[in-house]
Image (spheres, rainbow, N blue to C red):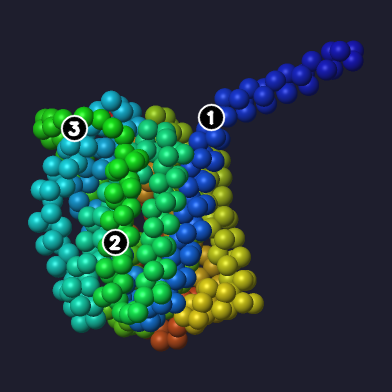
């Protein structure tokens, strides 16, 4: 009887051992990837502290807003063909050289469109506050220097080389932090001087990325392959522009309606919120790769709700911990940041809700539903513009304004959830 009772127990341990063994590679890959996120988090924080306490709050607001616009505009580069390059690295790595050539070709073709869109954004949001030379320098650094670095990261992740991608992410972010440190000890501290340091740091990252980390394959142009994927890439580019528009539009509106100083305070708070998203994006990236191979991965409600609950909990606890530190030590992140320190904890739900909207957008990309993703992001961008315009024009008190952001992002999350999970009921698109 004792031996019989021991058999189910041994079977249970055997099943657990098999489960762990089957997922050992996944766990190893995740920790390789998250190590890059952890290193990036440390250097991102150092970069933020150095820059936020060297520029004035108003100039930091101008830079953060121009940088957000540059990130959004950078998605026009190569008309979104980076998505085809990522799918190729994930599924058909032998074609990386061919699709890299396509990215370079389409990158050159897209430059006039990028320049025209940049000038339009400048006239609408920045003409009265940021010099054109400064705006152009920052957009150049984001779109033509940093975006290709992200391409190298994306390709390495697509190949499953998470360790190499992690090292590149750490080194590239460290170079930005080094640039901010050199700027801090320089003789002049204007936003114009910083824009040149920023270009230098991003240029060094670009040389590092393609000199040491990009896979070596012969470049071959195959126009017919690119044309076949161009429509999907344009959908992705449009969706990415709309995603960053709805993600960063708050900074543009705060600058346009509230002015540079309020934009600086707001940018400091949202930068701290952004830091909570770094580990979440690593998880989303790996989930997207698995969904490309298994589109029905999230078919069960328990899995969906469990992942969303985890994303919200991790994001909220991260900001709560930061808020507690700044409550007791308001100067922990520097003199300029201390002005925004009492406001950080008021945005307690914003990181989780914001990260969930971003996560849901990635689910549609993973299933190849790029047109639906673009439409959803456009609707969310319009809703966010309406909600934030109302908040900024009716609430004068900064504390109440930050507190109201919890409601704004809750409404955005509910809209995103409705749009995303309605779309996920449809069949996945073949990749």
Residue bearing mark 3: 219
Secondary structure beneath label 3: loop
Q: Is residue 311 visible?
A: yes
Q: Which residue is mark 2?
A: 200
x 42%, y 33%: residue:
160
- Compute the Cα span from label 2 to label 1: 38 Å
Q: Position of residue 100 (x, y in %)?
A: 22, 37
Find residue 364 and report its image quarter: top left
x and y percent of residue 408 in the render?
A: 42, 68
Q: Are marks 3 and 1 in contact (CB under 8 Å)?
A: no
270 sits left or right of 216 in the view: right
**Few, some or many residues within 10 Å of mark 1 (<14, 14–19, 20+):** few
Give SS at disc 1. Answer: helix
Depth check, front residue: 408 or 257: 257
The alpha-carbon separation of the residues under discs 2 and 3 comes to 27 Å
User: Vertical placement of 375 versus 84: above or below?
Assistant: below
Residue 352: x, y in percent?
50, 59
Question: Residue 379, can we see it?
Answer: no
Query: Which residue is identified by label 1?
Result: 25
Q: Position of residue 223 (x, y in %)?
A: 11, 32
């Amino acid at each position: 009887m004792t031996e019989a009772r021991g058999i189910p127990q041994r079977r249970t341990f055997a099943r657990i051992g098999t489960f762990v063994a089957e997922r050992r590679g996944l766990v190893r890959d995740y920790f390789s990837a998250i190590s890059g996120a952890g290193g990036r988090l440390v250097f991102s924080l150092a970069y933020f502290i150095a820059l936020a306490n060297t520029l004035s709050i108003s100039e930091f607001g101008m830079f953060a807003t121009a940088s957000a616009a540059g990130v959004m505009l950078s998605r026009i580069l190569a008309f979104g063909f980076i998505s085809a390059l990522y799918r190729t690295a994930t599924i058909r790595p032998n074609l990386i050289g061919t699709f890299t050539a396509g990215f370079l070709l389409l990158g050159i073709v897209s430059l006039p469109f990028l320049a025209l869109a940049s000038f339009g954004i400048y006239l609408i949001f920045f003409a009265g506050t940021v010099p054109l030379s400064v705006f152009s320098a920052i957009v150049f650094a984001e779109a033509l220097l940093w975006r290709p670095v992200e391409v190298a990261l994306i390709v390495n992740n697509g190949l499953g080389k998470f360790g190499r991608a992690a090292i590149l992410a750490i080194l590239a972010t460290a170079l930005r932090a080094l640039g901010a440190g050199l700027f801090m000890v320089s003789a002049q501290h204007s936003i114009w001087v910083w824009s040149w340091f920023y270009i230098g740091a991003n240029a060094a990252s670009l040389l590092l990325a393609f000199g040491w980390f990009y896979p070596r394959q012969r470049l071959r142009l195959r126009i017919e392959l690119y044309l076949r994927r161009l429509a999907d890439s344009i959908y992705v580019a449009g969706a990415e522009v709309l995603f960053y528009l709805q993600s960063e539009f708050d900074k543009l509106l705060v600058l346009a309606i509230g002015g540079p100083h309020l934009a600086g305070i707001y940018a400091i708070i949202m930068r701290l919120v952004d830091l909570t998203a770094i580990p979440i994006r690593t998880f989303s990236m790996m989930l997207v790769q698995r969904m490309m191979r298994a589109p029905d991965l999230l078919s069960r409600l328990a899995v969906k709700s469990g992942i969303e609950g985890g994303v919200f909990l991790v994001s909220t606890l991260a900001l709560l911990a930061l808020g507690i530190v700044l409550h007791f030590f308001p100067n922990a992140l520097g003199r300029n940041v201390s002005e925004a320190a009492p406001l950080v904890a008021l945005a307690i739900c914003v990181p989780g809700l914001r990260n969930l909207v971003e996560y849901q957008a990635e689910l549609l990309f993973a299933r190849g539903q790029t047109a639906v993703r673009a439409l959803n992001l456009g609707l969310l961008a319009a809703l966010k513009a309406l909600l934030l315009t109302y908040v900024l024009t009716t609430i004068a008190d900064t504390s109440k304004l930050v507190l109201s952001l919890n409601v704004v992002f809750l409404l955005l999350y509910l809209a995103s959830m409705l749009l995303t999970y309605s779309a996920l009921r449809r069949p996945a698109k073949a990749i």
